[in-house]
């Protein structure tokens, strides 16, 4: 089994998968996992250099081709262009993972309009744009298709010092449940996935500003500690598999119980502001 996966290598044989924000971090981890399990995968993000590097890395590790397109989820024209490419290349779509995101620590009182808008436009509005553009393609899937929206464990509670991301992720969670009902008759499942703490490069540069902050976050995780993209990819594979065909409008939390303990962003944010 690839990457010690618990799933069969051919689990997604012939399936067509589109992942936003797929050039780095967890998104790339998801992409490689789907490739390793037989799927055809397209990733998209804003930076061509990152996409090229991701494609080369995936080819080296999996021996399979990873398709990619430059796309900005904040630009509806850009999103439509990629949806048109999927239509011409595949004709349908089986799985969509809305993974594109942006976040950084800042109190609402000093947050600029542009800072707020930047995160909400990527996370919430971007999820709307991509989901809507891909809807006709998901409808054409020969089997039950699946949408997975990546959220965070502050989406249903307070999000101190990351209020822009919290409000956006809360909106995505609500949109997830709305689309689950609206699209059920089209045999499209829509679920949310809440990952644990994964120290991707973006997380390190925007949230885990130093080793002390990273340790603080880890202290809030009862089980498993800081995790990795491979473990998180296994959860997404499950949500998109036929084993989950009766699951829609739900939320899978895989954060080691962190959300039950408290909000690490509150402590991290206070520390950041006090210094």
Image (spheres, helix red, strand yellow):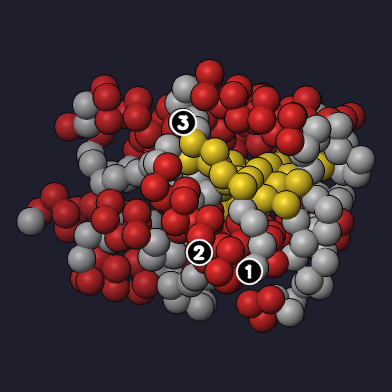
Residue on which the image places disc 2: 57
Q: Residues within 10 Å of mark 2 (few under 14, many from 20)?
A: some
**x and y, in percent, of residue 177 in the image:** 69, 35
Q: Is residue 219 visible?
A: yes
Query: In the rendered view of the protein, which quadrant contains the C terminus?
Result: bottom left
Q: Gap between marks 2 and 1, in whole Å? A: 8 Å
Residue picked out by circle 3: 72
Q: Earlier in the sequence, mark 2 or mark 1?
A: 2
Q: For the point 23% across and 39% down, which residue is it?
A: 107
- Residue 232 position by quadrant: bottom right
Q: Where residue 165 sits in the image (x, y, percent)?
A: 40, 39
Above or below, 220 relative to 67: below
Q: Earlier in the sequence, mark 2 or mark 3?
A: 2
Q: Which residue is mark 1?
A: 62
Q: Position of residue 38 (x, y in %)?
A: 77, 62
Mark 3 Cα within 10 Å, few/some/many (few <14, many 20+)?
A: many
- Image quadrant where one finds the N terminus: bottom right
> Which residue is most to the right?
142
- 2 or 3: mark nearer the eye: 2
Precedes in sequence: disc 3 or disc 1: 1
User: In whole angstroms, how far apart are the C-alphas of marks 2 and 3?
Assistant: 22 Å
For mark 1, give the secondary structure.
Answer: helix
Tag nearer the camera, 3 or 1: 1
Q: Mark 3: which secondary structure?
A: loop
| Callout 2–callout 3 Cβ contact below 8 Å | no
């Amino acid at each position: 089994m690839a990457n010690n996966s618990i799933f069969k290598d051919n689990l997604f044989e012939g399936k067509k998968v589109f992942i936003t924000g797929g050039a780095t971090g967890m998104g790339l981890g998801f992409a490689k996992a789907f490739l390793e399990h037989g799927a055809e995968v397209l990733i998209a993000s804003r930076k061509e250099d990152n996409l090229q590097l991701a494609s080369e890395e995936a080819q080296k590790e999996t021996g399979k081709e990873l398709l990619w397109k430059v796309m900005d989820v904040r630009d509806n024209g850009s999103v439509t262009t990629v949806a048109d490419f999927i239509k011409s290349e595949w004709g349908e779509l089986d799985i969509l993972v809305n993974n594109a995101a942006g976040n950084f620590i800042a109190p609402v009182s000093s947050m600029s309009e542009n800072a707020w808008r930047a995160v909400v436009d990527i996370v919430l509005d971007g999820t709307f744009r991509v989901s809507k553009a891909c809807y006709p393609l998901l409808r054409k899937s020969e089997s039950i298709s699946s949408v997975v929206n990546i959220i965070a464990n502050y989406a249903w509670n307070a999000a101190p010092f990351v209020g822009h991301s919290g409000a956006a992720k809360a909106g995505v969670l609500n949109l997830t449940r709305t689309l689950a009902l609206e699209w059920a008759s089209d045999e499209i499942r829509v679920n949310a996935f809440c990952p644990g703490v994964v120290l991707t490069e973006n997380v390190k540069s925007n949230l885990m500003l130093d080793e002390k902050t990273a340790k603080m976050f880890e202290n809030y995780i009862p089980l498993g500690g800081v995790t990795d993209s491979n473990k998180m990819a296994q959860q997404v594979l499950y949500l998109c598999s036929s084993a989950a065909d009766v699951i829609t409008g739900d939320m899978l939390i895989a954060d080691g119980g962190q959300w039950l303990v408290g909000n690490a962003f509150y402590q991290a944010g206070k520390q950041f502001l006090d210094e």
